[in-house]
Amino acid sequence: MNRGLLLLLSIFFIIKIQAQEGKPDLFGVSYGSDKIKNDSVKGKIKDVDAFLNFPIYRDNEEAVGGRLQFKSRSISGLDPAFSKDLYGTDFFVFWQVKIKQKYKLYFFAQVGAYSDFKDISEEDFRYSFGARYTIQHNDNLKTGW
C-alpha cells in the first residue's frame, strides 16, 4: 500500500478516535446552506440543527441523562415533488451503570417524529432502544458489545 495513503488514513482515524472521547456540549445550534446546481437544476438546501443535553443524575457508579434535538431541512428551487420542508424532533435518554472498576453497562431509548409536520401519522414516528457493555482495558483502549 502507498505510504502516503497509509499515513493519511492513520491521521484520519486518530482524529476520529480522539473526537469520540470529547465531552458533549450542553447545547448547540448550527445552520448550513448549500446550492444544488448542474446543467438543468438550480436549487438550495438549508439545514438547521439544535440540541439540548441535560444531566439527570450522576455519581461515581451511575449516570442518567438525555437529549432533546430538532432538525430542519428545506429544499427549494427544484421540481415540486422534491422541494420540501422536512423536520425531525426527538428525545433520547440513557442510563449508565458501573459494574466493576473497568466494566460498564449502558442502556438507551429514543423516540422521535420525522415529517413535514403537515399531516402527522404513526408512520412519522421512530423508536429505538438498546444496550452496550464496555470494558476499559487501559486509558487508551475501551472495547464493547
Image (spheres, rainbow, N blue to C red):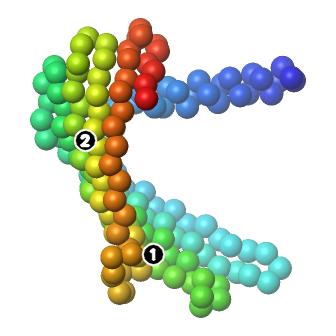
Q: Nearer the viewer, residue 48 or 135?
A: 135
Number of numbered discs on residues? 2
Few, some or many C-alpha atoms within 10 Å of disc 2 (few <14, some 14-19, many ≥20)? Answer: some
For the point 37% across and 64% down, which residue is it?
A: 126
Camera-side residue: 134 or 52? 134
In the displayed orientation, state which residue is furthest to the bottom: 80
* 7 is higher (above) or lower (below) than 26: above
Q: Residue 13: image x %, image y %?
A: 62, 28
**Which residue is at 35% across, 27% downward?**
133
From this view, report whether residue 34 is shown above or below residue 64.
Answer: below
Q: Are marks 1 and 2 in contact (CB under 8 Å)?
A: no
Report the amino acid beneath label 2: Phe
Q: Which quadrant of the figure contains the C terminus?
A: top left
Task: Name the image quarter holding the N terminus.
Answer: top right
Q: Position of residue 46 (x, y in %)?
A: 52, 70
Apparent side of residue 6 relative to residue 84 in the rendered image (left or right): right
Instruction: Determine which of the numbered discs, if any, sits on residue 94 in the image.
Output: 2
Secondary structure beneath label 1: strand
Q: At numbered mark 2, what does the secondary structure look like: helix, strand or loop?
A: strand
Examine the rendered structure and indicate whether residue 48 appears above or below residue 5. below
Tell me what residue is drawn at x 27 percent, y 57 percent. Answer: 91
